[in-house]
Amino acid sequence: MYKTILVPLDGSPRAEMILPHALSLALKYQARLVLIEVVEPLVAMVTPYDMVPYVDQNAVEQAVEEAKNYLASKEGEMRGEGIETKVLVENGPIVSAILEAAEREGADLIAMASHGRTGLARVFYGSVAAGILQKADRPLLLVRAQD
């Protein structure tokens, strides 16, 4: 049923709550896991004289390196369970980067944890899960992460 499962992570224990579910599905269907973390460029400054935002390239490079190290550790854990695993670190807007990776990798399923924000928190912070849910053209497994 599932050959490739895309698992977006952000380095937090809440996001990792999807891993037991993804692992179980991967074992059952002998599927490959693709672990992805998306690094959004951090705008360091916008001056009143120039409307172009300044992105701190050193901070971006550091965040990419941290994401690679984090995903490499998770890849090792999944491979230790006998699961074929690939890692991706992408740059850009989170929702579109996840959807583009799902298309490129031929993911049959996107499996992720939702932080479960509601009301004003969801309005102010947005919801990656809601964005994926609205735009995904493939099955989505959402697990609500609890504190």
Image (spheres, grey):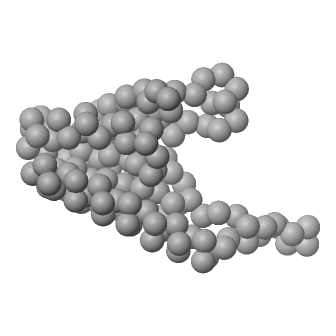
Work out whether residue 25 or residue 102 is closer to the camera in this orientation and state it.
25
Tag count in the figure?
A: 0
Residue 37: x and y in percent read 42, 56
Compared across the picture, whether 5 is left or right of 40 comes to left
Q: Is residue 104 visible?
A: no
Which picture quadrant has residue 144? Answer: top left
Work out whether residue 38 or residue 95 is closer to the camera in this orientation and state it.
38
Residue under the image location 70 percent in, 35 percent down: 124
Eyeballing the image, is 141 above or below 59?
A: above
Residue 126: x and y in percent read 61, 37
Residue under the image location 11 percent in, 40 percent down: 27
Screen quadrant of the N terminus: top left
Residue 59: x and y in percent read 60, 71
Work out whether residue 99 or residue 143 is closer to the camera in this orientation and state it.
143
Eyeballing the image, is 117 above or below 7?
A: above
Work out whether residue 31 or residue 99 is closer to the camera in this orientation and state it.
31
- Farthest-out residue, bottom: 58
Residue under the image location 46 percent in, 27 percent down: 146
Compared across the picture, whether 144 is left or right of 5 comes to right
- Farthest-out residue, top: 119
Residue under the image location 66 percent in, 30 percent down: 121
Compared across the picture, whether 73 is left or right of 50 comes to left
Residue 17: x and y in percent read 36, 36
Q: Is residue 32 visible?
A: yes
